[in-house]
Amino acid sequence: MLRTDDSAVRDLLSRIFGEDHDGLVDDWVRWQLTGSSAQLDESALRREATELLGALRDALETGLPSAQIIERDQAVRSALRGLSERRARAGTAPAVTAAAILALKRTTLSALERRSEDPAVRYQASLLVNELLDAAGLLTFSVYVEGREEIIRRQHQQMLELSTPVVRLWRQVLAVPLIGTLDSARTQVVMNNLLEAIQTHEARVAIIDITGVSTVDTAVAQHLLQTVSAVRLMGAECLISGVRPSIAQTVTQLGIDLSHIVTRGSLADALAAALDLLGDRTRAVTG
């Protein structure tokens, strides 16, 4: 097996990343622009290339073992994370990120062939390039997946908030129309939004309308009870509207006690009850 001094190999790659910087950047950017169907910004690609090549050059000049550069060098990791996160935010496919690293490998190996005529040095340098950039590819893919998952979580949270709006029906009367399934995550959003709105509007009555809730089981009922308790701790009264005959039967069969909560069949009836609690019924009718 051919062997050569590791320091000579690292020095060669460091000089390639430094002295051949402009050519590497040009080649790498060209590879990405021609090899991908995604809309990539050339100036952004050049900034990425400059940052990553500089970080790799500096890392090779340290005493950090080659196998640990991608894992432990903060500048290299930062450059790779930035490259992957930008693609994740842009909505590009994971293959585009993988192609970027493969393109850098091709570019570097091409420069290596031009730089060295020693087969031993070239062989060992090629192994090092593959080791570095294979690890870089794994990191960028992992970061890409994390980034997409974070975007999905954030969008899910935004959709939850949009699906649980707090509506001001009357002076000191708020309502939350619920549609779909009420789970733990959504209950927390409902509770947070409603409690904040109660404080902002100085509301005295809150109506939770479940007309759009398809089914009510023990878990849903518990979520409703938690929300009612939280509203009362804020000093407001809580009513539940939209209790259809099927839901009333289900709640009774499940043995869930809602007797301490004011319930009404429709939002209009609940609003009338809320105005009675406020002593504002006459103004509601004449206003």
Image (spheres, grey):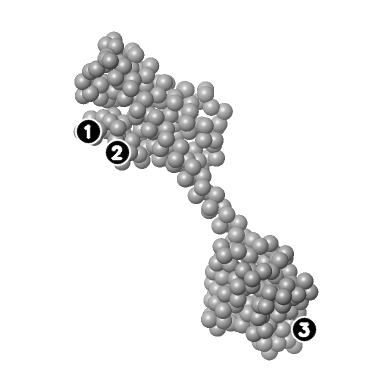
Q: Quadrant of residue 45?
A: top left
Q: CA distance from mark 3 to mark 2?
A: 71 Å
Q: Position of residue 34 (x, y in %)?
A: 52, 22
Q: Position of residue 111 (x, y in %)?
A: 35, 17
Give the residue at x 73% y 72%.
250
Q: Verify CB contact (< 8 Å) between mark 1 and mark 2.
A: yes
Direction from residue 233 to residue 62 in the image, left or right: left
Which label was assigned to residue 62?
A: 1
Q: Residue at x 56, y 62 (%)?
A: 185
Please name the amino acid that badge 3 sits on: Val
Residue 266 visible in the picture = no
Are there few (<14), some (14-19), or many (20+) residues within 10 Å of tag 3?
few
Of the residues tagged 3 and 1, which is closer to the observer? 1
Which residue lies under the disc numbered 2?
73
Q: Residue at (72%, 77%) from the top-left corner?
A: 252
Which label was assigned to residue 285?
3
C-alpha separation, residue under disc 1 versus residue under disc 2: 10 Å
